[in-house]
Image (spheres, rainbow, N blue to C red):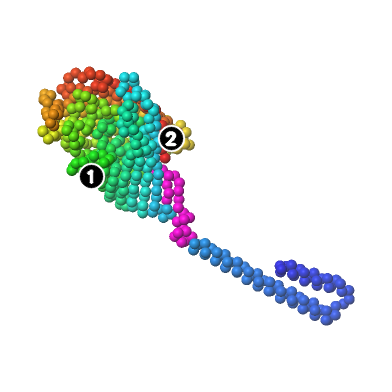
């Protein structure tokens, strides 16, 4: 019962007794009143003591409860269960442990479009799927990284030719690497050969819809092996790899491919990894294990993948068998022009020189040399700055590629390179100019659409600088092709 209420009740009783008594109080009555007052004072003191004890008990109970909660939260299993994170970042969708020792990212893209060609082209108008890829990146104990990348639609032949091509699932990247020391990392598995610039991009990273001819023809792509790589002082990156040289399969020869690449990041790699100067070198051996050694190693392709010269009856004399050596130099500048990230510009240029030996069991033929260069520019302006990554982006790109053995000025003598197989010592030169005009729009940083008009000026000339070989559109013509492509990435 509340102490105040009891006090008021006692006072009320006393007042009632006083009022009810009209006569003078006797000493006995006064004594009784004093006793009642004493009882009230004692009860008030007892109630005060009880209230203090109750407050103390409540404080003890609260401290005990808080201690139990804290002890439970400090248990490792409780922390992990309560703080595992999941969501989406720049690297893709992720699942991350509480201590950061385990991170799993999933990213990828889907790219599809429509290709339209001139009526006299060897290619057919067609819708196409240029990739449906998933990439899984696992970071373990912050010092190890593994990647697996699948393409769920890889045609066995050119997209736009009626060649009975079938689509298949292919494994692109599959490697594990130690990344604990930024200056010295080690990667083992299947990965890009560190030789070119454009040849190490994924399809959504290109300036245009397609990579250029000399990249598609000579860049080598992915291979199985080991690579040492690292970044020094956030400005200098190096890569040195030893790989099979057979592409995405086991080695068929005793020789290996050796490649190296170095890049200088003038704005610091951590702040702008898309602006750099690049130098790459490569040395590998071509060997098809067949009679002629014809592996299309020197032939040029259109940007969308059609073989231009090699494989045509009577023209398949650019056989190579032996060591090839290449050098690739270039650079890229990719940066915003304002602090609000409204306008962005990208320049990219690359030059490649490649030389092939033509060594056969019966003798050695003249070397074949290849030269290629490209220059591209893309400008993006964000019409809706509140939408990150959005904007309209016009672009232009020009490239040149040529294959020849011009240093050889002898007659077209015939040599037998295998029983019953004769090959000319000289080859017909192959030259190709490509011009690409583009206009695209990014709805946000995940979805974009672009249109490319590609003009390809192809020539096959005599090595002595004589007249062009007018044998049809395949040897001397300018082709036009138009592509509309949509990309969604995450």
431 in relation to 223, above or below: above
Lower sequence index among marks 1 and 2: 1
Look at the image and tell me in which quarter the C terminus lies.
top left
Element on which disc 2 rests: strand
Res 50 quadrant in image: bottom right
Say whether residue 340 is left or right of residue 68.
left
For label 1, the SS is strand
Looking at the rendered image, the quarter that the N terminus falls into is bottom right
Toward the right, the furthest residue is 23
Q: Which residue is mark 1?
A: 242
From which residue to which does the magenta span run? 73-96
Disc on res. 232 = none
Q: Quadrant of residue 218?
A: top left
Percent coordinates x, y for residue 304 in the rendering: 32, 29
Q: Does the segment drawn in magenta span residue 211?
A: no
Q: Which residue position holds label 2? A: 447
Which residue appears at 19% of the width and 29% of the height?
318
As drawn, the residue found furthest toward the bottom would be 28
Label 1 environment density (alpha carbons within 10 Å; few <14, some 14–19, many ≥20): some
Contact, CB < 8 Å: mark 1 with mark 2? Answer: no
Q: Residue at (45%, 33%) from the top-left corner?
A: 443
Q: Position of residue 120 (x, y in %)?
A: 31, 19
Of marks 1 and 2, the one in the foreground: 1
């Amino acid at each position: 019962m509340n102490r105040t209420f009891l006090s008021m009740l006692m006072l009320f009783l006393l007042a009632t007794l006083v009022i009810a008594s009209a006569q003078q109080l006797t000493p006995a009555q006064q004594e009784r009143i004093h006793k009642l007052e004493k009882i009230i004072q004692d009860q008030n003191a007892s109630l005060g003591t009880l209230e203090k004890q109750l407050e103390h008990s409540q404080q003890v109970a609260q401290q005990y409860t808080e201690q139990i909660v804290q002890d439970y939260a400090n248990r490792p299993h409780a922390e992990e269960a309560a703080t595992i994170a999941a969501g989406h970042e720049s690297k893709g969708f992720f699942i991350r442990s509480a201590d950061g020792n385990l991170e799993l990212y999933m990213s990828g893209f889907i790219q599809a479009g429509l290709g339209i060609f001139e009526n006299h082209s060897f290619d057919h108008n067609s819708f196409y799927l240029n990739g449906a890829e998933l990439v899984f990146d696992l970071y373990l104990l912050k010092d190890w990284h593994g990647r697996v990348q699948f393409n769920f639609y890889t045609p066995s032949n050119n997209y736009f030719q009626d060649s009975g091509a079938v689509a298949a699932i292919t494994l692109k990247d599959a490697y594990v690497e130690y990344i604990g020391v930024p200056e010295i990392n080690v990667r083992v598995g299947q990965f890009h050969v560190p030789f070119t610039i454009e040849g190490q991009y994924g399809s959504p990273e290109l300036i245009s819809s397609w990579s250029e001819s000399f990249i598609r023809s000579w860049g080598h792509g992915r291979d199985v092996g080991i690579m040492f790589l690292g970044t020094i002082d956030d400005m200098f990156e190096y890569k040195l790899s030893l790989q099979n040289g057979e592409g995405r399969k086991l080695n068929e020869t005793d020789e290996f491919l050796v490649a190296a690449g170095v890049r200088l990041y003038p704005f610091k790699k951590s702040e702008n990894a898309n602006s750099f100067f690049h130098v790459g070198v490569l040395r590998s051996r071509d060997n098809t294990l067949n009679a002629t050694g014809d592996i299309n190693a020197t032939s040029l392709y259109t940007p969308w993948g059609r073989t231009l010269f090699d494989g045509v009856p009577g023209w398949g004399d650019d056989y190579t068998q032996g060591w090839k050596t290449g050098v690739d130099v270039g650079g890229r500048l990719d940066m915003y022009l304002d602090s609000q990230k409204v306008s962005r510009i990208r320049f990219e240029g690359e030059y490649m020189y490649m030389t092939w030996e033509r060594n056969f069991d019966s003798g050695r033929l003249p070397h074949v040399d290849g030269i290629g260069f490209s220059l591209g520019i893309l400008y993006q302006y964000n019409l809706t700055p509140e939408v990150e990554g959005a904007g309209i982006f016009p672009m232009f790109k020009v490239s040149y590629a040529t294959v020849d053995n011009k240093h050889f000025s002898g007659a077209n003598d015939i040599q037998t390179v295998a029983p019953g197989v004769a090959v000319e010592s000289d080859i017909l030169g192959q030259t190709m100019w490509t011009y690409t005009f583009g206009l695209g729009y990014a709805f946000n940083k995940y979805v974009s659409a672009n249109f490319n008009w590609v003009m390809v000026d192809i020539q096959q000339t005599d090595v002595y600088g004589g007249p062009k070989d007018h044998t049809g559109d395949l040897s001397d013509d300018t082709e036009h092709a138009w592509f509309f492509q949509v990309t969604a990435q995450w």
